[in-house]
């Protein structure tokens, strides 16, 4: 069974702080995706990383794929209340399955 | 253009009943995947269909079945409902499935009493 562990599970911070969310697995994935999900809605894709060691930036969000393609991180600089939500990493395994991580619930207070 | 649409948005059933959930993909998308998301957890993969054929199946019992129609819409069926089937059921579509980005609907909230 392929598992993706995310840490931390919960994160509550003040506006302006920086944070990092980690996504770890013992399996190698062909690619990894990050999603954000808000209450009452489906997950929305933020980024896809494919190459080991790849770094992608999306405004204040920085995503990194581990060299061995088993782990990834999401760093948010100067968090804002609008960043609040459930952050999910998802690894593509065997081209047929998207395996989601356990999720990190982020709350940013003004 | 319309995104992925799911119906119904909410549903209440009792144990032992059967349920059918429906999904319409984004126009042009040929792959549909189904996920179960229990409160407080990440979505769990149930099925992936591409061009009306089952391409992948997650670790769910045979009570769960699905199909994809010629217009690429899809149905998820669950028989003999259990309390533990209470969850948000998400449908996602993509052009070809696999490692392509998934576009999610807002889900069907199923509650079993």
Image (cartoon, coloured by chain):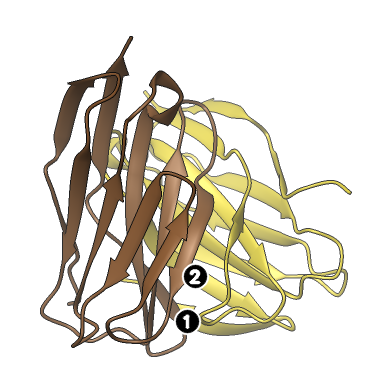
Image coords of residue A63 (percent x, y)? 34, 61
- Do the residues at discs 1 and 2 belong to one chain? yes
Tell me which numbered mark, 1 or 2, is placed earlier along the sequence.
2
Provide the secondary structure element on which disc 1 rests: strand
Q: Tell me the quarter of the picture where residue B11 sits.
A: top right
Residue at horizontal 19%, vertical 22%? A13
Classify residue B52 by image quadrant.
Answer: bottom right
User: At numbered mark 2, what does the secondary structure look like: helix, strand or loop?
Assistant: strand
Disc 1 packing (10 Å; few <14; some 14–19; many ≥20):
some
The chain letter for the residue carrying disc 1 is: B
* In the image, residue B84 above or below residue A15: below
Q: Colour of chain B?
A: yellow
Which residue matches tag 2? B47
Residue B66, percent from left and from top: 59, 66
**Chain of the residue under label 2:** B
In the image, B52 versus A68, the foreground residue is: A68
Instruction: In the picture, one chain is brown; tell me its letter.
Output: A
Residue in the picture at 42% in, 66% down:
A56
Please state which of residues A6 and A12 is positioned toward the viewer in this rendering: A12
Above/below status of B15 relative to A22:
above
Residue, disc 1: B56
Distance of label 1 from label 2 (alpha carbons): 6 Å
State left or right for residue A87 relative to residue A10.
right
Cβ–Cβ under 8 Å for marks 1 and 2: yes
């Amino acid at each position: 069974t392929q598992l993706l562990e995310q840490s931390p599970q919960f994160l509550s911070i003040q506006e302006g702080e920086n944070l990092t969310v980690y996504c770890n697995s013992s399996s190698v994935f062909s690619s990894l995706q990050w999603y954000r999900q808000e209450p009452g809605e489906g997950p929305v894709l933020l980024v896809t990383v494919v190459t080991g060691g790849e770094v992608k930036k999306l405004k204040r969000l920085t995503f990194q794929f581990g060299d061995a393609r088993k782990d990834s991180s999401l760093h948010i600089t100067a968090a804002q209340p609008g960043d609040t939500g459930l952050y999910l990493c998802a690894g593509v395994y065997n081209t047929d399955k998207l395996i989601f991580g356990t999720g990190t619930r982020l709350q940013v207070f003004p | 253009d319309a995104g992925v649409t799911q119906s119904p948005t909410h549903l209440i059933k009792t144990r032992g009943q059967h349920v059918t959930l429906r999904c319409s993909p984004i126009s042009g998308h040929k792959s549909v995947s189904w996920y179960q998301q229990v409160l407080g957890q990440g979505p769990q993969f149930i099925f992936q269909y591409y061009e009306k054929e089952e391409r992948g199946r997650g670790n769910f019992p045979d009570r769960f079945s699905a199909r994809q129609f010629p217009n690429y819409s899809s149905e998820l069926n669950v028989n003999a409902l259990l309390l533990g089937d209470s969850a948000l059921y998400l449908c996602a579509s993509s052009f070809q499935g696999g490692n392509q980005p998934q576009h999610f609907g807002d889900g069907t909230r199923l509650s079993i009493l």
